[in-house]
Amino acid sequence: MTLALAVAAGLLIGLSLGALGGGGSILAVPVLVYLLDQTATQATTGSLVVVGVTSLIGAVTAQRAGNVLLGRGAVFGAVGIGGAALGAKGAAYVDDDVLLAAFAALMLIVGAIMAWRQLHHGRRGAHSARPHLDDPIISFSPTFACNCPRALKVLITATAVGLLTGFLGVGGGFLVVPALVLALGLPMRYAAGTSLVAITITSAAALAVRAGAATAPDWGVVATLTVASAAAAALGARVADRADTGRLQIAFTVLVLAVAVYTGARALPALL
């Protein structure tokens, strides 16, 4: 029964990631806790595996489609490693109910952001031109030059994203994409694919810090969830080509908000 639940949940997560380009990984923690009987600490650790592997596969797919700026994604991810390590260490000292309450609050924020985006969809024109790559933030040749305000944006946003990734075990695509748009000036088309590179790096860093330090999840369950999610992501991409993406996004937003309310209702009473 546990194996069947892991497969079904993995398919749902993968389909949402493939069809919507992100967001599905936020379901991994509640799935691991409430369907697969993992503690919050185990779930946030196991979720990093699901997030990291699925993001890596998605990044490879996006790279083949020409929608990834590998250098910028790698830099953003590398800057976020410090925050990811700090968040991963901090999670080990926080009570499970506090982790779940924080996760519920994050899901509510994510659901609100997704709803806001849907309400404002289409107001801004799409940018399809590939951004220029000859505008580095910091350069040393022929002379040293620094676009310091922009560098500070990258430092703050990447560290914040890494912190959330390490602490709550989420990919944070809903945070990385707007961060890449604001801090690096990437068009949305490239921000979505490039974010997967950054997520892969920060997830791997957080998992490395947690290895041996936190209570290990049931790796068999996590592996099953990861394989199902990764396999379904490709199918989700095909679904996106045929289905009404707007309706899919609305349905997923409702699902995220419902799971957030359920998670909060389970976690908050334990804190009072």
Image (cartoon, helix red, strand yellow):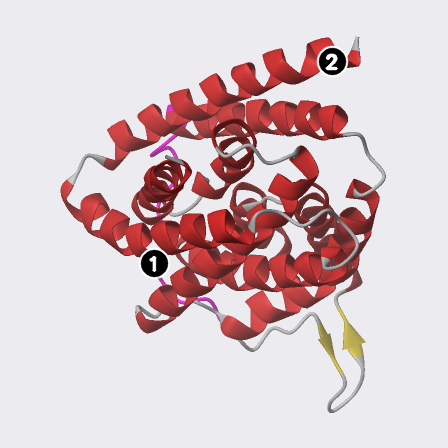
How far is disc 1 from disc 2 in space, using C-alphas?
49 Å
- Taken as a whole, is the magenta stretch helix, strand or loop? loop
Residue drawn at point x = 65 percent, y = 69 percent = 75
**Toward the viewer: 238 or 7?**
7
Quadrant for the C terminus, please. top right
Q: Is residue 265 above or below residue 84?
A: above
| Image-based side of 113 in relation to 127, left or right | right
Which residue matches tag 2?
270
Q: Residue pushed farthest bottom?
A: 142
Is the residue under label 2 in contact with that under label 1 (CB below 8 Å)?
A: no
Q: Which mark is residue 174?
A: none
| Image-based side of 120 in relation to 269, left or right | left
Residue drawn at point x = 60 percent, y = 70 percent = 74
Q: Is residue 171 visible?
A: no
Give the percent coordinates (x, y) of residue 198. Answer: 58, 61
Three-letter code, disc 2: Ala
Q: In the rendered structure, which disc, 1 or 2, sits on the residue that comes first in sequence?
A: 1
Three-letter code, disc 1: Ser
Residue drawn at point x = 32 percent, y = 25 percent = 251
Q: Which residues are magenta?
A: 119-132
Q: Secondary structure at mark 2?
A: helix
Give the percent coordinates (x, y) of residue 116. Answer: 47, 25
Q: Quadrant of residue 77?
A: bottom right
Classed neighbour count for the residue bearing mark 2: other residues with Cα under 10 Å, few (<14), some (14–19), many (≥20): few
Task: Report the mark closest to the observer, 1 or 2.
Answer: 2
Q: Is residue 232 visible?
A: yes
**Toward the viewer: 266 or 237?**
266
Which residue matches tag 1?
128
| Image-based side of 215 in relation to 119, left or right | right
Give the percent coordinates (x, y) of residue 217. Answer: 62, 47
- Number of numbered discs on residues: 2
